[in-house]
Image (tube, rainbow, N blue to C red):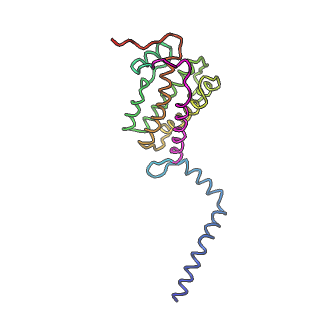
Amino acid sequence: MEIAKLLLEYIKVLAWPSVILTIVLMFRKQIESLIKRLEKADLPGGVSISLRAEILEAKKLSEQVIAEPLSPQAKGVQNLPLTEANLRMIKLGLQPSPSGLNVNYYRDLVEDDPNLALAGLRLEVDVLAKNLATGFGIDVTPKDSGGRLIKKLHDAGSITLQQAQLIQKILKLANAGIDGTSVSYREASQIINIAGVLVNQYIAWLSWGFDDGWQPRQKR
């Protein structure tokens, strides 16, 4: 009797892989579709597989952007102080920044609500995209989204491919805050830190990108 039971269990072990293989072959398309949906879905605990992958890609892009050579106009020019940022933009006919170009505003906001911080970051990037387009003489229409303006800027040669790709990636990640995707404190912080690379370059552009002879205020 015991031998019969052992033999039955052995047969079950041998049969199990073949059963699995049969199921996989029969429902291959359905399983592939399920995996694709899972990669875009939020898992228990608020972990998003696709979000992690997008953040990693954004980080790599930010490193490429940092490594790009400076514009000849930027060499030797001091950066605009944050305290003068909005005043400078208003004088140039640009839209002031919601945060005054201070990324720490969103870093602080992450502690209370990561999604709200990303939603705010999305609005910030839209403002910067519009200002860049205006500053470079790109035609801006009321229907132009931040993403569309970035494409126009790249097509006109005003920004590099890496800069355009990074901005588009940040916009995509920041949309998570608006779409209601569960975003962790760590993920939101990483996104905001990466966006800081773009903000720093934007501040530098405000310093050297206009023919108005801007100079930092002399300290008294």
* Relative depth, front residue between 194 and 67: 67
Give me the residue at 62% from left, 53% from top. Answer: 33
Q: Is residue 170 above or below residue 204?
A: below
Give me the residue at 56% from left, 33% from top. Answer: 168
The x, y position of residue 72, in whole percent, is 56, 19
> Which image quarter is the C terminus in?
top left
53 sits left or right of 97 in the view:
right
The stretch of residues the image draws in magenta is 49-78
* Relative depth, front residue between 14 and 48: 14
Give the residue furthest to the front.
76
Q: Is residue 212 above or below residue 156?
A: above
* Relative depth, front residue between 56 and 112: 56
The x, y position of residue 80, in whole percent, is 44, 19
Give me the residue at 62% from left, 26% from top. Answer: 154
Residue 37 covered by magenta stretch: no
Q: Is residue 24 above or below residue 201?
A: below
The x, y position of residue 160, in whole percent, is 60, 27
Please tell me whether the stretch drawn in magenta is mainly helix, strand or loop. helix
How many discs mark residues in the rendered view?
A: 0
Rendering quarter of residue 155: top right
Give the residue furthest to the bottom.
1
Residue 50 covered by magenta stretch: yes
The x, y position of residue 118, in whole percent, is 46, 35
